[in-house]
Amino acid sequence: MESENKNLISHLAAWINWKRFIFAVLMIFFLTSILFPFYWMVSSSFKTRAEIGGREPVYVPSGLRLDAYKELFDPSNPSYQNFGVNIINTLRVSIPTAFVTVILAVLGSYAIARLRFKGKEFLLNSILIVYLFPGVLLIIPLFAMLAQIGDVFNFDVQDNLGVLMFTYMAQTLPVALYMLTNYFRTIPDEIEQAALIDGCSRVQVIWKVTLPLAIPALISVGIYTFMIAWNEFLYAMVFLNDRFLFTMPIKINTIFNDPTPRPNVVMAASTIMTIPIMILFLALEKYLTEGLTAGGVKG
């Protein structure tokens, strides 16, 4: 046994060097800085208020208490938060935002990548410059513009999830256009020209040739825009006043600012908000990688 331990130590000593040691230390630090906050959030959702608010940190809850989750979802709880409605509201905004953004980005980016017209490079760069402006600078002109349009077409700007979706597109569409334009440029033009010679129309070329090759990029853009809408706080805070229309970030902020502090409930709601995005990201990681790095020629 001692000889086996010595052999293991000797092999380890022969394998390790300064580069590998530094790399291992950096990886441990990197993973800890990412995983520990997530663990703290999930574990805190099962803690009592005393365990969270005590002077000494409690790293492992004394039991898997579901009090915080019952407050979010159990109607019989005295502090029932009806969090399921907030999840549905977030989905009602996030899914259409991602879907419409991808459709519009496909049409716009294909035109920029394939069609010839004056100023298209300037147009593409201008779109990216708009995205560089922080959202807080765009929210006032957006609100004023939508309020004027609402007066003309007789609809309310506030407490309107459709209007909120439109404001999200102001943030998601520029980067979606830029990402898809660069991806469409990697698809060889000869493939589309061959389809046109075979008798396909431009629309058929896009539908039957270009889009199948761009599926990884479409999924990447869809997930990216979905995540922006899922996590967005500022615009929802300005445009939503009705508690029954609150998205999850606004509801979590409401619970956090409640006169009676309940950090375990905040952590439970944050856990519910975070886990679906993590599952979606991990499930579609292959397409995300291909969408950001792969070219258009498939083997």
Image (cartoon, grey):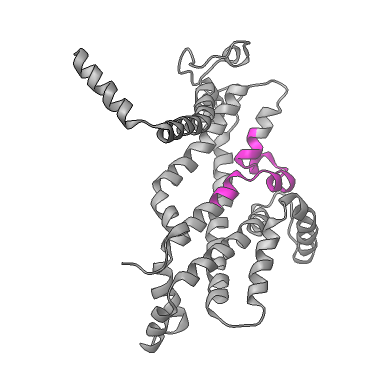
Q: Residue 227 lies in magenta, yes or no?
A: yes
Q: Quadrant of residue 188?
A: bottom left
Q: Nearer the viewer, residue 40 or 68?
A: 40
The residue range painted magenta reads 226-252
Q: Position of residue 63 (x, y in %)?
A: 46, 14
Q: Quadrant of residue 263?
A: top right
Q: Is residue 63 left or right of residue 129?
A: left
Q: Nearer the viewer, residue 79 or 266?
A: 266
Magenta span: predominant SS is helix
Q: Nearer the viewer, residue 110 or 99?
A: 110
Q: Answer above or below: position of 260 versus 244.
A: above
Q: Which quadrant: the C terminus?
A: bottom left
Number of labelled discs?
Answer: 0
Q: Is residue 38 left or right of residue 139?
A: left
Q: Residue 18 lies in magenta, yes or no?
A: no
Q: Nearer the viewer, residue 115 or 51?
A: 115
Q: Is residue 198 left or right of residue 77?
A: left
Who's the residue at 65% across and 56% down the image?
171
Q: Answer above or below: position of 74 versus 49.
A: below
Q: Which quadrant: the N terminus?
A: top left
Who's the residue at 71% across and 28% down the image?
257
Who's the residue at 24% across and 17% down the image?
5
Q: Position of residue 285 (x, y in %)?
A: 41, 49
Q: Answer above or below: position of 77 versus 87.
A: above
Q: Position of residue 123 (x, y in %)?
A: 66, 72
Who's the residue at 52% across and 26% down the image?
69
